[in-house]
Image (spheres, rainbow, N blue to C red):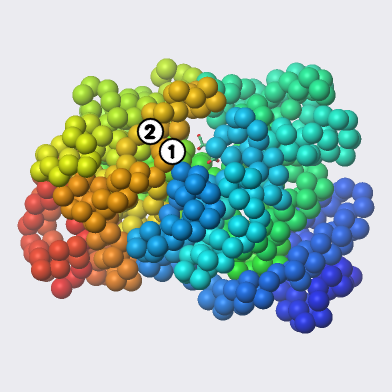
Amino acid sequence: MSSSIHHLLNAVPEGRHAEAGRRYAVHGPALRSCLHSLYGATPGFEQWYGSLLAAVGELHGARSPALAALDTARAAQPDWFLGQQMLGYCSYVDRFGGDLRGVARRIPHLQELGVRYLHLLPFLKMREGENDGGFAVASFEQVEPRFGSNADLEALTASLREAGISLCADFILNHVADDHAWARGACEGDERLRSFFHLFPDRAQPDAYERTLGQVFPQAAPGNFTYVPAMDAWAWTTFYPYQWDLNWSNPEVFSAMAGTLLRLANRGIEVFRLDSTAFLWKREGTNCMNQPEAHLILQALRALTSIAAPGVLLKAEAIVPMRELPAYFGQPKQPECHIAYHSSLMAAAWGSLAEQDAGLVRSVVEGTPALPPNASWLSYVRCHDDIGWNVLRAEAAEAAEGAAGRARDPQARLAAISRFFAGADGSYARGEAFQSSDPHAAHGSNGMAASLAGLEGASSVSSGSSVPISDAEGMALRRLLLLHGLALSFGALPVLYMGDELGQTNDYSFRERADRAMDSRWLQRPMLDEQRCAERHDNGTQAGRVYAALRTLVAARRHLPALAAGEPRSLLPAPNAVLALQRGPAFLALYNFSGEPQQFTLAGRWQDCLEPEQSHEGEMTIAPWAMLWLQRD
Ligand code: OTU
């Protein structure tokens, strides 16, 4: 240990020695222990570890004074992202602002909404041609030229910081594009770079792995391996054939990616969304997800950022069953991510809406594991991906046992939900099923929240004209608010998805593009609708009604400390269709997932947080699809 710290300190400027020494004393043991477990058996481990620390020291030293100040402030207040005033927003750079400078021009829009955290979907140089919406990265060192320059990125992070908004960026660490320099080098025969990937000379090993692997895109990209003629080899490609999985069992991959992460942090990125974290480690005979080594990798990255850029947060994008999620927060001595997507909560809320029964969402809320201090869930209604139903298999099985008349197998139950959102049997939803290879199984559903909630079907009149709210629109609006209400009250960092604040509906234009037509996730990736945006303060328009209602929720939440991420949560007994979510002793949220009015009996007198002149007491009726936020009088 004492000799390793030497490597670190030698690289750090004098003025930061004491700080680096202190941080290494705290986080060095976890770093070393994780890396030793992963790579200790590799010859030359000590030397490799020393050069890793030297690189880390240099990047620590290169941190700007503004970011170093942020590090200090965040270290003094490690719960800074847990408050009820935290609100996130997620968008594509081009679809929101054209380019990075255009995004900067949208800062007032974000501030008007109360946003404190902006997740911009991939904006680094992406593969030419098809690139999975930028999730096939050609270079981590350069901003996508269409979006601007590295200087534009640094300017944007500075402007956001000034506006009190943290920038979150994807760190796509499971794979790189086939035109990334590492992949190109491998094709040209560079042995060192070949060892950055999982390559196989024939189908023997791929076939052995395939026996227990799942498929992420069974229709558009079946199988997990791709033949690469230039190498006469099969590359591991969990996602699209042009996304080559990195071989994290190679310590050089670790050091290359660690440097990448810290360089991006030094450009001002404050939160990293660790994309597809579940897939980082491969083990034959398993589904190659959530392996213990994947957690060691993440814990080592956490220790590194705690040393060189402690203001930074790590967020796990692990779309896995809920029972697998606690591991992504790590252990007390080896913490991992600060935040994790709660995709089960998101999917269950939609599922309950389809079933008009709160059973699924109740199981998820009840089963949600407790979190360590200074950690948070991420709650959301929609994102750029499909709503994946498979994370709910356990809950779908469990709740099906109790509910009479629903004694179906969980797969069939989830498939019925998926059909509902594809508009089956006269449902109000306008979505599409995604990538089911098995007609009896449900993979995912696509569509903008407004379309899935029935707003698309309800609005036969163009958004410009002021028309009276139709019943159908009113009900769709209630469903949209119910889902957002849950995300905002659950106890998490809630993230709004661009366009949802305006009730934007599906974008069908992807069907005309050969590079997108096979991937219906593009349904929910529209351009920001300028007209709706201009109408947002006009309650005579649909966009205005959605916007006003959502802002009321956000504004009310800001004044309700019971809704902070760390506050306790519990459920009260309620009719099947109702979720009665209690936060702390004095706050109660009621959500009616059905189209029928529901009765609920309140103990004592409660004030309505959304309509402050109203209060409720005793037996009350919850209107179809209505939500209420109540505070003890
Ligand atoms: C992530 O998602 C991204 O969010 C997707 O947009 C990318 O296509 C993908 O990684 C590859 O980079 O596996 O653990 O089912 O939920 O692809 C998360 C679709 C993932 C996504 C899934 C995904």
Quadrant in which the N terminus is drawn: bottom right
Reply above or below: 348 against 9.
Answer: above
**Quadrant of residue 181 in the image?**
top right
Q: Tell me if label 2 and label 1 are in contact, CB under 8 Å.
A: yes
Label 1: few (<14), some (14–19) or many (≥20) C-alpha neighbours in 10 Å:
many
Task: Identify which residue is drawn at 53% across, 76% down.
Answer: 77
Residue ID at (22%, 31%): 457
**Is residue 330 visible in the rendered structure shown here?**
no
**Ligand 1 quadrant?**
top right
**Image x and y of residue 311, in percent:** 60, 69
- What label does residue 525 carry, if any? 1
Say which quarter of the image contains residue 593.
top left
Is the CB atom of the residue marked by disc 1 within 8 angstroms of ligand 1's nearest atom? no
Q: Where is residue 350 drawn, in percent x and y?
A: 32, 40
Q: Amino acid at mark 1?
A: Arg
Q: Position of residue 608 (x, y in %)?
A: 16, 64
**Looking at the figure, which quarter contains the C terminus?**
bottom left
Q: Is residue 299 above or below residue 78?
A: above
Q: Secondary structure at mark 1?
A: loop
Q: Is residue 58 visible?
A: yes
**Is 475 displayed left or right of 406 in the figure?**
left
* Residue picked out by circle 2: 507
Q: Position of residue 269 (x, y in %)?
A: 60, 60
- What amino acid type is highlighted by mark number 2? Asp
Along the line of sight, which residue is nearer the eye, 413 or 200?
200
Please determine whether, in this image, residue 587 is positioned above or below residue 400: below
For label 2, the SS is: loop
**As drawn, is 496 to the left or to the right of 40?**
left
Name the residue at 7% across, 61% down.
Answer: 618
Q: Residue at x 60, y 34 (%)?
A: 131
Q: Nearer the viewer, residue 375 or 560?
A: 560
